[in-house]
Amino acid sequence: MKSNILGVKVDAVNMDGALSKIEQYILSGRPHHVITLNAEILYTAQDDPALLEIINSAHLITPDGAGIVWAAKHLGQPVPERVTGIDLMLHLMYRAEERGWRVFLYGAAPGVAEEAAAKLMEKHPELKIVGISHGYLDDEGEVKLRQEVRDAEPHVLLAALGAPKQEYWIQEHLGALSVPVNMGVGGSFDVIAGRVRRAPLWMQRARLEWLYRLIQEPKRYKRMLNLPKFMLAVYKEGKS
């Protein structure tokens, strides 16, 4: 089941449903693109046909963000719950350890992915992290990275390049890398590494994570201006 929001069909899944789909992708062995979609990126895609096409071509689009959950409910196509990128990633690491899936971490500033990997290994001693790279690579570094991914043959590639850059990167290399599950995780490595604090649980439950991030990073205010525009667009769609 899917919810159609401003021309994007978001999967109406909960966490267990998303994990089940990911497991099916890994068992198939074929490359798949997973996007955890928030309102900011969905609204940006309204003026970016290439991005909109990439989102709609993804195999799994989860409702990441209070805005997506609100929009789906407002349009009469509710989703069960938020399935955020960082939460999906953390749950996926439990299953990867159990199943023996190989994981490759790519992105963030130099040193961050290594720190995130170390934190993940503390919680999951049997987790198979088969590759790590920061996201500040030149052309030569990119070529080397792609070969490292092919050689490592991971089941899961997590790209922390920030949206929508990570979505463009995954789509461009999806077929050549042949990784069963490719997912953009934004700033998740920074949070897991402990360099950035996530909003307190009460703010997450109150759907105020966006406010916490804005307080931490005031420069995000221009991007946050897309949120009321997104709401207005959803209101208009609901009346049409």
Image: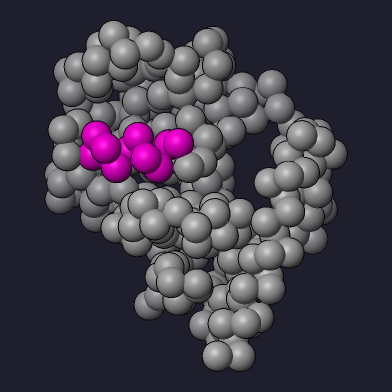
What is the tally of numbered marks visible in this picture?
A: 0
In the rendered image of this protein, does residue 126 appear above or below residue 206?
Answer: above
In the rendered image of this protein, does residue 51 appear above or below residue 168?
Answer: below
Can see residue 97? no
- Where does residue 89 sit, x and y in percent of width and height? 48, 41
Quadrant of the rendered image containing residue 232: bottom right
The residue under the point 34% across, 29% down is: 103
Quadrant of the rendered image containing residue 168: top left
The C terminus, quarter of image: bottom right
The residue under the point 29% across, 42% down is: 171
The residue under the point 78% across, 55% down is: 208
- Residue range highlighted in magenta: 165-174
Q: Nearer the viewer, residue 55 or 232?
A: 232
Q: Is residue 47 left or right of residue 140?
A: right
- Where does residue 120 sit, x and y in percent of width and height? 51, 25
The residue under the point 20% across, 44% down is: 31
In the rendered image of this protein, does residue 19 appear above or below residue 6?
Answer: above
Q: Is residue 186 left or right of residue 198?
A: left
The N terminus, quarter of image: bottom left
Say if the magenta span includes residue 237.
Answer: no
- Where does residue 61 sit, x and y in percent of width and height? 41, 59
Q: Nearer the viewer, residue 226 or 19?
A: 226
Say if the magenta span includes residue 170.
Answer: yes
Classified by dominant secondary structure, the portion drawn in magenta counts as helix
In this picture the colour scheme is: one colour
Can see residue 46? yes
